[in-house]
Image (tube, rainbow, N blue to C red):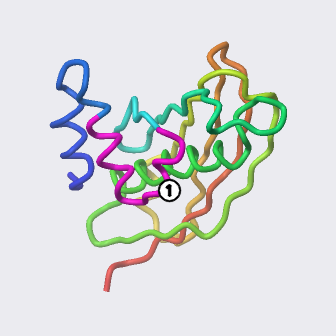
């Protein structure tokens, strides 16, 4: 079990504030995550969810959640998933992101990252992580792939 996943399991079970404590701590790992005030709501191997609150601070000129804020949330979800899922003896680094904006982001957005365990267990260093952002009404507002480069630790 990774250090990040141990932190999640120990903090997320604290009533009311546990997930918030974890989210703040994880945001310190890459400080730019803090700009979207994220809340990690689910984390397990091969699955992570991060909520971006719909706040004026992350709006664009038309009053919706900005595309780059959405990408930031997707990257945070992917990073949490990767740290939680990667087998011992391997390391990862993102090498690209491809996304499509499919609807206006007019509510809080849940950013979801998903993989299959077989992807991590294989020898192919190119690992695509499926990502999407979903509005409160279930509409997908952004979807795509974040590609990781996964190699053995030296």
Q: Among all residues in the image, which is located at the extreme top?
A: 137
Quadrant in which residue 105 is drawn: top right
Residue 87 colored in magenta in the image: no
Location of residue 2 in the rendering, given as x and y in whole percent from the top left corner: 23, 55
Location of residue 109 in the rendering, given as x and y in whole percent from the top left corner: 60, 28
User: Magenta residues?
Assistant: 21-37
Q: Among all residues in the image, which is located at the extreme bottom?
A: 154
Please tell me how crowded label 1 is: few (under 14), some (14-19), or many (20+) other residues with Cα within 10 Å.
Answer: few
Residue 25 colored in magenta in the image: yes
* Residue in front for this viewpoint, 47 or 70: 70
Location of residue 66 in the rendering, given as x and y in whole percent from the top left corner: 72, 41
Query: Image point 55% across, 28% down: which residue?
Result: 53
Q: Is residue 67 left or right of residue 78?
A: right
What kind of secondary structure does the magenta stretch mostly adopt? helix
Quarter of the picture containing the C terminus is bottom left
* Residue in front for this viewpoint, 62 or 42: 62
- The residue where tag 1 is placed is 32
Query: Image point 71% across, 28% down: which residue?
Result: 140
Query: Image point 66% across, 52% down: which residue?
Result: 145
Residue 96 position (above or below residue 145) = below
Query: Image point 74% across, 55% down: which residue?
Result: 98
Q: Is residue 125 left or right of residue 45?
A: right
* Residue in front for this viewpoint, 107 or 141: 107
Residue 82 position (above or below residue 56) = below
Secondary structure of the residue carrying tag 1 is helix
Q: How many marks?
A: 1
Quadrant in which residue 139 is drawn: top right
């Amino acid at each position: 079990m990774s250090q990040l996943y141990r932190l999640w399991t120990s903090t997320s079970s604290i009533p009311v504030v546990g997930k918030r404590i974890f989210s703040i701590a994880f945001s310190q790992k890459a400080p730019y995550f803090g700009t979207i005030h994220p809340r990690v709501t689910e984390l397990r191997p091969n699955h992570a969810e991060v909520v971006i609150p719909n706040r004026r601070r992350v709006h664009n000129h038309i009053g919706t959640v900005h595309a780059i804020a959405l990408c930031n949330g997707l990257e945070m979800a992917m990073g949490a998933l990767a740290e939680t899922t990667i087998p011992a003896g391997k390391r990862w680094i993102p090498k690209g992101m491809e996304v499509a904006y499919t609807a206006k982001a007019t509510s809080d957005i849940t950013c979801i990252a998903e993989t299959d365990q077989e992807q991590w267990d294989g020898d192919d260093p190119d690992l695509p992580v499926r990502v999407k952002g979903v509005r409160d009404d279930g509409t997908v507002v952004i979807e795509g792939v974040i590609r990781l480069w996964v190699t053995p630790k030296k």
